[in-house]
Amino acid sequence: MRDFKHLVLHGLFMLFYSFVKYIPLPLFEWTRFIVCKPFFRQLQSVKISDGVQFWFPYRIRIGKNSSVNQGTIIDGYGEVNIGDNVRIGPYVVINSCDHKFDDCDIPIAEQGYVVGEVTLEDDVWIGSHVVINKGVKVGKGCVVGSGAVVVSDLEPYGVYAGVPAKLIRKRNV
């Protein structure tokens, strides 16, 4: 991903997006949508709040009627798929990659990356300050409580909280 083509593409995105990223007026959700749309793999929702940070947007999909609140960071390096009617609270971090660190004879910075696709299925609500790690699938209808750290797949229609995120109860389905 660090080849010339991707660096240029990401640089162009950051150049255009930097003009509208922090403007808090509601009209600028539309402006952010217009600026982001050509760079995303798929973008069907206008609701992108101010201060949202996207990395590798051309590997991110966001479905219809989904919202991403202020201060959220979405790293699309390993691909991120966000379904329809998903609510992502403020200051959420979605990581689709991590550093390799197994070989103690090589500095961590030189060992490369481990990537894993992150999927948030339809009708999911992610509370504020949640961290979602690589390779995780959050099932349809899940609710993830504030401050949770999601390190493994979550069953559909569950309510999760804690570090690591654990099933608290099932929603009334």
Image (cartoon, helix red, strand yellow):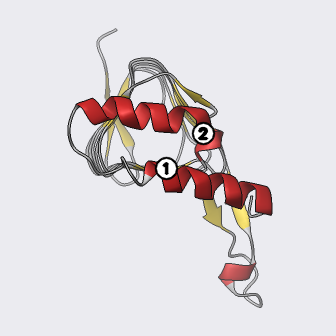
Q: CA distance from mark 2 to mark 1?
A: 10 Å
**Which of the two discs, 2 and 1, sits closer to the camera?**
1
| Extreme residue in the left direction | 25
> Which numbered dot is residue 82?
none
Residue at 67 percent of width and 52 percent of height: 9
Tell me what residue is drawn at x 30 percent, y 39 percent: 49
Query: What kind of element bears circle 1?
Result: helix
73 or 149: which is nearer to us? 73
Which residue is more in the foreground, 161 or 5? 5
Say which quadrant the C terminus sits in.
top left
Q: Quick one: quadrant of the N terminus?
A: bottom right
Percent x, y for residue 8? 69, 58
**Label 2 vs 1, first from the N-terminus:** 1
Mark 2 touches mark 1? (CB < 8 Å): yes
Read off the residue under disc 1: 16
- Count neighbours of disc 1 (C-alpha within 10 A) and say few if under 14, some if 14 to 19, many if 20 or more: few
> Which residue was labeled with disc 2?
39
